[in-house]
Amino acid sequence: MTQLMRRVVTKYWWQLELLSFVVLSLIWILPWGFSGKIYLGDDLGFHLNRIQGLAKDIQLSGNWWQIPAVSTAAFSGWGYPINLFYPAAALLPAAWLQTIASGVGGYYVFLVLLNVLTLWVAATVAARLLPSRSQAFLAAVIYGFAQYRFLDFFVRGSLAEGIVFAFLPLIFYGVYSIAAGDYHKWPWLAVGMALIALTHVISLVLSSVGVVIMLSLWGLRRKELRARGLRFGAAAGLAVFLSLSFLGPLVVQLRHVGKLGIAQYTLADSATHLGDLLWNSLNDAVASNAINFGVLLLVTSVLAIIVWRQLRPFDHYCLVLGGIFVFLATNLFPWPLFQGLLGTIQFPWRFLALADFPLALVGARAVMVIARAKTFQRALIVVPVVTAIAVGLSFSASTALYRSVGPNNAKVVTNATYLANATQDTTTDYVAQRGLVSMAAVRTHSIPVMNTQPNGQQPASLQQLAVRPVTNGLVYTLKSTTAQEIKLPQLDYYGYHVFVNGREQMPRLDSNGVVHIHVNAGTSQIRYVYQRTTVQYLTSGLTWLAWLSFIGIGCWRWLQRQRRLTAET
């Protein structure tokens, strides 16, 4: 019987693994997903607005692949150019799903698919680093059901940071390959960094720091040092080109807009206390002010320390590396010295995301060593038991959150309230500080309101007949009794153009960055639209060329290997 099971598992491993990941991902969203409810965590309203804006713009333009710069169907509909500052590529699948299955259901389908992807990537990478596929499967489960990742998705509502977990194993594997393994695998570092750059900029900064720490801790092998150094440089260069379509326009926009309204935090104050971190981890706390990495990773890390002498040097590296990232999450690190350099990360405990994968690798190894799971029969018992524990802890945390929130909490979103929550976010992070004073009037979409006189009266000479969204902009129909200069309920960003009755007009900007134009007496149609810039065309072309070349060369090399293997057999 055991031999039969071994043959079945060996022959159908990837199918069984994928099926397991699907089942585990369905359990992961319990009980929220099957109750038709979403807990509106700290940042989730912001991300739902991003998804809804993409979905409506896809329906408006009919282009399922083009990411619009401006959101005209969300964020109160004023034409927020969110996608110029916050990468949206990773949210396209979520937007596509919203066009098919709108509301809560479409969101949870996206989460399930994303979780399957994360588990599969983690297992695939772990299989190249650990002695057996059973250990790789277990490491992927420990990673995918880590408490900090759960907090990102279900408590903090940090969707973009949660998506990044799917790409962090690629970075770890790329750094390992360059520093100590087969340096010909260096492209994985470039791909991982590029995908993170196209998902979440703060995570890109964190990952860059992580890469430096990982390389420093490994130390490049003296053997073939020059070749490894060159591969690292190539990985950095390729990562830039693969993500240049977003990073290039972002730099241009930041220089044009100036200082933004993003909240600033003092790293020393926002870092967690080590005692609180450990206590909250022991309790698997489910509050956004109780950041932790969970009892599972804490216990498996302790087990790794206990069996330290039975572990490989690679396992030691993973444990030490994870410990360093946990240390960086706390106020024990001298963060005041790095406020100017790394202030953009806002919260040092975000380094826990980088700690999860190496701790999951060494945790899986430690469990198998302690359980003496050296045989197939033993692994067949240990892996399902530990998987059940990991899933059970996550389900327990989710259930605790579900019960603590209650059904009538204002932060619980249902299909009936989904659209309101996914379109009315009032975030002003990417509004220039000088323009914040005008935002209340801008959100009205009303030209008469925007031109309210000092006495509080709206001008009788202006009558707004209509306003409608178009791809990357808004169209106003206005009736004026006299020729005059007016203010539009719009703020200036690089790439915006104004057309009055079909003729482009150079607007005047006031001290708040509000757009002023001239209209003649009579009815005017005013189009305020964003048009792709020269920088966007150039960087997009370079990024597409880089991706196509990378994929093409990869496919060619794979075919060459297959032909060699066929010839040898």
Image: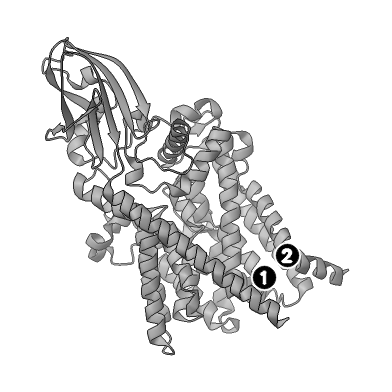
Determine whether 343 is above or below 11 in the image.
above
Who comes first in sequence, dot 2 or dot 1?
A: 2
Specify the farthest residue to the right.
1
Name the spot of residue 66 as percent of width and height, x first: 43, 43
Q: Which mark is residue 13?
A: 2
Residue 450 in the figure: left or right of residue 454: right
Count of marks placed on residues = 2
In this orientation, which residue lies closer to the viewer: 498 or 301?
498
**In the rendered image, which quarter contains the N terminus?**
bottom right
Disc 1 element: helix
Specify the farthest residue to the bottom.
223
Point 53% across, 64% down: residue? 298
Dot 2, how many residues are within 10 Å of its Cα: few (below 14), some (14-19), or many (20+)? some
Q: Name the residue under label 1.
A: 133
Point 34% across, 37% down: residue? 70
Q: Which mark is residue 93?
A: none
Residue 305 in the figure: left or right of residue 458: right
Residue 435 in the figure: left or right of residue 89: left
Name the spot of residue 506 as percent of width and height, x first: 16, 33
Is residue 140 visible to us here?
A: yes
